[in-house]
Image: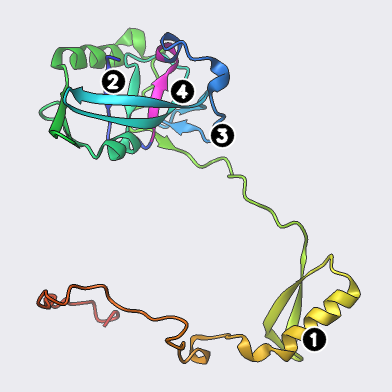
């Protein structure tokens, strides 16, 4: 697929609708996306959905193949797709805009993809031309805007705060409100009878038996120890 913009300022991989139609992928294969995209100048657009596509970069034998998740947007653009930070990270790629060059590791050495300077200038002229200002969304440096609240799991019931000890509202435990009165009483009695196993501060945890947990550094005993350079902190941090 030609005319792909490599943009390490983009937080998403974008596939434009006209390129998506050329791939002849059924629209019902798009996964819904609720988070809008915001362009460099603040323009907002809602993707039609997302699609996972296998992308091959480089020339044989120095090729890499990764599966990228593209957000499909229905807006005119001189480009077919934008490969942003997620795709570049998958390919472990390094981009040089000065040289229009992208390099990435492969099984057979370092692979590379070179840009076409003439095509890049043509796309840029089209994007900033008077005829295209009202049609092309300047979606360079796109960011996923979290205006839409994500769907977080909600508790199935309310909880009641029960003090561990009478007249001490700081040390409390939670009991489900839908428990029966008998179950609440039994649970409360059980927790209060075993309150010595609860720790309310770090001072109440003097240590853990090595039979339960041991912390050790996995270092090579054959390697000599290396002393780190002294780091000076600000007075308040000292």
Q: Position of residue 219 (x, y in %)?
A: 21, 73
Q: Is residue 39 visible?
A: no
Q: What is the crowding at mark 1: few (fewer than 14 residues within 10 Å), some, or many (at least 20)?
A: few
Highlighted range, magenta: 12-19
Q: Nearer the viewer, residue 197 or 19?
A: 197
State the quadrant of the C terminus: bottom left
Residue tagged 3: 34
Q: Position of residue 47 (x, y in %)?
A: 50, 26
Tell me if residue 80 comes above or below residue 49 in the rendering: above
**Distance of mark 4 from mark 1, alpha carbons?**
57 Å
Q: Nearer the viewer, residue 160 or 199?
A: 199
**Distance of mark 4 from mark 3, alpha carbons?**
12 Å
Residue 155 image-quadrant placement? bottom right
Residue tagged 1: 189
The disc placed on residue 4 is 2
**Distance of mark 1 from mark 3, alpha carbons?**
47 Å
Q: Is residue 198 visible?
A: yes
Residue tagged 4: 72
| Dot 2 or dot 4, earlier in sequence | 2
| Dot 4 or dot 1, earlier in sequence | 4
């Amino acid at each position: 697929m030609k005319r792909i913009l490599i943009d390490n300022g983009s937080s998403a991989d974008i596939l434009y609708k006209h390129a998506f139609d050329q791939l002849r992928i059924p629209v019902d294969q798009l996964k819904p996306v609720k988070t809008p995209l915001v362009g460099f100048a603040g323009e907002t657009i809602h993707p039609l959905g997302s699609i996972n596509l296998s992308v091959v970069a480089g020339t044989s034998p120095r090729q890499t193949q990764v599966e990228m998740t593209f957000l499909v947007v229905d807006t005119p653009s001189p480009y077919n797709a934008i490969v942003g930070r997620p795709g570049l990270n998958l390919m472990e790629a390094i981009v040089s805009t000065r040289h229009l060059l992208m390099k990435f590791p492969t099984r057979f050495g370092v692979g590379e993809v070179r840009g076409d300077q003439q095509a890049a200038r043509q796309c840029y002229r089209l994007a900033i031309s008077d005829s295209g200002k009202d049609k092309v969304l300047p979606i360079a440096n796109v960011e996923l805007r979290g205006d839409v609240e994500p769907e977080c799991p909600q508790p199935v019931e309310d909880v009641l705060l029960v003090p561990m000890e009478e007249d001490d509202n700081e040390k409390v435990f939670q009991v489900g409100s839908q428990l029966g009165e008998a179950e609440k009483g039994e649970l409360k009695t059980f927790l209060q009878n075993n309150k010595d196993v609860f720790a309310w501060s770090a001072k109440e945890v003097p240590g853990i038996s090595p039979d339960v947990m041991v912390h050790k550094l996995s270092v090579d005993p054959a390697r000599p120890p290396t002393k780190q350079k002294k780091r000076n902190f600000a007075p308040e941090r000292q």
